[in-house]
Amino acid sequence: MVARKVSEVLPTEQKLEGGGFPVRRPFPIAGMSHIDPFLLIDEMGPVDWPPGGAIGAPEHPHRGFETVTYVLQGEMEHADSSGNSGKLSAGDVQWMTAGRGIIHSELPSEEFLRTGGVMHGFQIWVNLPAKDKMMAPRYQDIQSSEIPEVVSDDGLVKARVIAGECMGVSAVIDTMIPISYIHFSLQPGGEICQKIPSGQNCLLYCFAGAISVGSGGSGSGGTAEQVEVGDGQLAVMGDGDSVEIAHFDGAVAEVLLLAGEPTGESVARYGPFVMNTQREIMQAIDDYQNGTLVA
């Protein structure tokens, strides 16, 4: 196998999203609009909300891509124009394909709003190829108990397989393009070599502790091919057919691995709409304003 090397390490920027929810965002930011097929990565919180203080994202539209919400702590309620609704609690995933158009909201549940507490999670936007941008919307609500988990033989690495495959275990979510979305938890001494098909773009986002990325094994000072990636940093990987991750610092290092087959198509975006041309963007805006975005 050819181990991928780190091409660059991106920091995060602090942003406010939805109704004013704080997020850490490696992209899109100035100079980095997207990393095909991924359009956005937001780490939501963690925020410790007082009773009555929690906020989320009120009703808003989408067209032309998928939103993936992964809750680590807290509880959210989802409702959309297709009639789907449900709660997202710790460990749950919502994979929503907006397709030709959907209007939805993601808000703290009534119980969480009443009691307050820590809200923490992720939202990832995944682009759709041109041929699928106007497909019928669909919604996959995966409870935490349904998401496959696997532990390395030495017990030092745990993986939650949201999409793709890891250590012989496959995800239950159906994706429109080949995608890997894996949450690794690495204890001191833990390391993993994850296969990623050559040609796919691969990203590693660390959100607790620190990891060492590249060949050479667990963090012992590193080699020229090893790079430390710390809390709130995104490693953009070069090509190859595997990625080597090792615990570097912290009681437990937490990292998301994202990999996907690029669409290789032009991207036109405006707020909640992502299409291939500006004409298509204008059409999406017109459809929303005219009340025809949702068929």
Image (cartoon, rainbow, N blue to C red):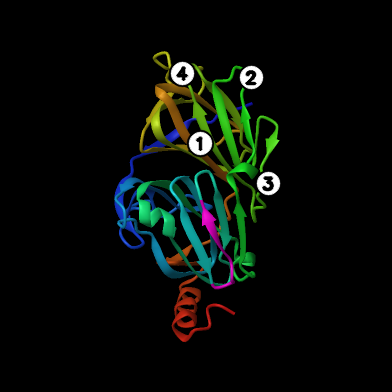
**Of pointers 1 and 2, the one earlier in the residue sequence:** 2
The residue sitting at 41% across, 22% down in the picture is 251
Q: Which three-letter amino acid code belongs to the residue tagged 2?
A: Asp
Q: Which three-letter amino acid code belongs to the residue tagged 1?
A: Gly
For disc 3, the marked residue is 172
Say if 68 sits above or below 147 in the image. Answer: below
What distance separates the C-alpha of mark 1 from that of mark 4? 26 Å
The residue sitting at 64% across, 19% down in the picture is 153
Query: Quick one: SS at disc 3?
Result: loop
Q: Nearer the viewer, residue 246 or 86?
A: 86
Q: Nearer the viewer, residue 201 or 147?
A: 147
**Of pointers 2 and 4, the one earlier in the residue sequence:** 2
Magenta part of the chain: 81-88
**Disc nearest the viewer among 1 and 2:** 2
What distance separates the C-alpha of mark 3 from that of mark 2? 23 Å
Q: Is residue 125 left or right of residue 21?
A: right
For disc 1, the marked residue is 238
**Disc nearest the viewer among 1 and 4:** 4
Q: Is residue 281 left or right of residue 164?
A: left
What distance separates the C-alpha of mark 4 from that of mark 3? 29 Å
Quadrant that contains the N terminus: top right
Say if 259 sits above or below 251 in the image. Answer: below
Rendering coords of residue 119 (x, y %): 39, 47
For disc 2, the marked residue is 153
The residue sitting at 59% across, 72% down in the picture is 82
Query: Quick one: SS at disc 2?
Result: loop
Q: Residues within 10 Å of mark 3 (few under 14, many from 20)?
A: some
Say if 55 sits above or below 207 in the image. Answer: below
**Of pointers 3 and 1, the one earlier in the residue sequence:** 3
